[in-house]
Each structure stands twice: as C-alpha cells, then as structure tokens.
Amino acid sequence: MWSYDKILQYPIRIKNPNPAMATLIISQYGGPDGELGASLRYLSQRFTMITPEAIATLSDIGTEELAHLEMVGTMVYQLMKNATVEEIEKAGAGAYFTDHGRGVYPQSAAGTPFTAAALQVKGDPIVDLTENLAAEQKARGTYEYLIQMADDPDVIEPLKFLREREVVHYQRFGEALRKVQDYLQEPRLFIMPKPEFMNNR
Amino acid sequence: MANNNFMELRKEISAVHMMLEDLQLYLNTHPSDRDAIAKRNAFVRQMRMLKDEYNKNYGMISQDDSLSPYPWQWIDEPWPWEPDANFKL
C-alpha cells in the first residue's frame, strides 16, 4: 500500500506557458520510456523477483517513479495552464488540445496513448533487471533530448533532476543485478541459465 | 498562507526527503553499511520533527501521519502541482 505526501519530490514553478514544450514533455508521463511505464514495470516485477536486495530495489524505485510521474504531470499542467487557445494552436499543440484541452493525459509526444506494450515483466530475475537497466538509460536519453529542446530554466532544472535520478536508478539496478547473479552463483555469465525441464528434451 | 516560513519548511522537508530517498535506495543494495543506516535514522527523526512543525502551523502534509483540526483539513490548498505550493530554488 501507499501513503501520499502533499509535496512534490522537487519543486516546479513555471512562470511562462509553453504548450509546445508541454506536448513534448508529456512523453515522460505516458510515453514508451515514461514514468508511468517505469513505475508499472518495477512494481509488477516485484512479485517474482529474488534476493531481498533486488525486491526492495524494485519496490522503492517503482514508488519513486510515481513521484516522478506527478512531477512530469505538474510540468505539463503548468506549461498549458495560462496559454491562450491561440498560443496553443500556434505552438502546434492544437491536436493535443482537441483531444484533451489543458488536461494531462498519458500519451507519447507523438500522440500514442499509454500502452503497456512498451514495458515487460518476464518473471525471470535476470531478464527483468536487465530490461530495467535499459529502461533507465532510455529514460535518461529522453530527458537529455527534452533538455536540448528546452530554453526555460524553470523547465530545465526539474528535467535535470529527473535525469539524475535515472542515473542513480541505473546504478542501483546494476548492483541489484550483481546480487542476483551472485546468488545464482554465476558471477561472470551474462547469459540465461538452462531451465531444468530442458534437460530431458 | 504562502509566507516565508511556509516555503522554508517545505524546502527543508523536501531536502530531508531527498536524503531519505537516496539513502533508502543505497541501503537496499548495501544493507551492511552501519554509517548509512545511522544517517538514515537521523534523517527519519529530523523528518518527524519537520512534519510535526508543518502540521501544527500549516496543515496536513502526510495522509497517514498528519492530524486534522475541525473542519477536515486534507482538502485545503495548495496541492503540490500548483506553483504556489513550490518553493524557489
């Protein structure tokens, strides 16, 4: 279960509306490498994870991603809030406005609604943790693209914070993977163990 | 509502939360780091005091921990996504 605190993980005060930026940042809300997918991926993988270290890592990072989801939603909300319809249209955000107004909807920057097809839960500890290492790097890359396109410090600073968290998460997942590999006594083999049922086939 | 102490307190809560978050993730993969556990526990105590002070002066911040006067205070603004809920860095 969870408990809510009425405070963002990192402060967001965006003075100038920017609908174009809002419809790009939305990708980290509901896009393929976004925070919603990250949270669902980790929280769902927990059930079949092994080793206490890796289970706790999934649980806590999956929880932190929900706080990041709230931050990204806040950025989209504040960037759209005081924009006029004319500004929204001029910024190329008319398609988004048509479907969602100034609301925050989980979709990619290209307009694809959130889909669990971009995440995986394989029920195999090595496979799942390896996927997570890639996921953190993909999210880091997305934040870097967004930072390259942003020109407002009010937007850049929270994006930098979120990017840094991806780096920390990558480190922790790497450590968790090592614990699992040690546990499986295959410290240098980055391959799948042969399942037992394959022995008599 | 949005006076300096209100923002200052939220800033302190945010900073301590960051330390807690990072130490928590670190300890999950380094469970035998005695110093890190001590640091983390110290931040937990500090957070309790900060949230208590916030609760007394500015209302509820934690769903499960904060006390409410009459009438029910959880519904009061500001919600975190409003700019006025966020301190300047």
Image (tube, coloured by chain):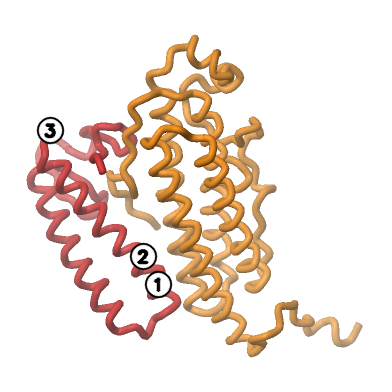
Chain colours: A orange, B red
B17 left or right of A114 in image: left
Could you say which is closer to the camera, residue A77 or residue A62?
Answer: A77
Q: Residue at x 68, y 64 (%)?
A: A122
Specify the subunit that label 1 lies on: B
Q: CA distance from mark 3 to mark 2?
A: 30 Å
Q: Are marks 1 and 2 in contact (CB under 8 Å)?
A: yes
Q: Which image quarter holds the C terminus of chain A?
A: bottom right
Q: CA distance from mark 1 to mark 2?
A: 6 Å
Residue B1 got which mark? 3
Frontmost of labels 3 and 2 is 2
Q: Identify residue for label 2.
A: B22
Is residue A151 in sight in this rendering?
yes
Q: Residue at x 28, y 44 (%)?
A: A6
What is the secondary structure assignment of the residue under circle 1? Answer: helix
Q: Which image quarter holds the N terminus of chain A?
A: bottom left
What is the secondary structure assignment of the residue under circle 3? Answer: loop
Q: CA distance from mark 1 to mark 3?
A: 36 Å
Kind of residue indicated by mark 3: Met
Q: Identify residue for label 1.
A: B26
> Can you say whether B73 is above or below A138 in the image?
above
Q: Earlier in the sequence, mark 1 or mark 3?
A: 3
Label 2 crowding class (10 Å Cα cut-off): few <14, some 14-19, many 20+? some
A106 left or right of B86 in image: right
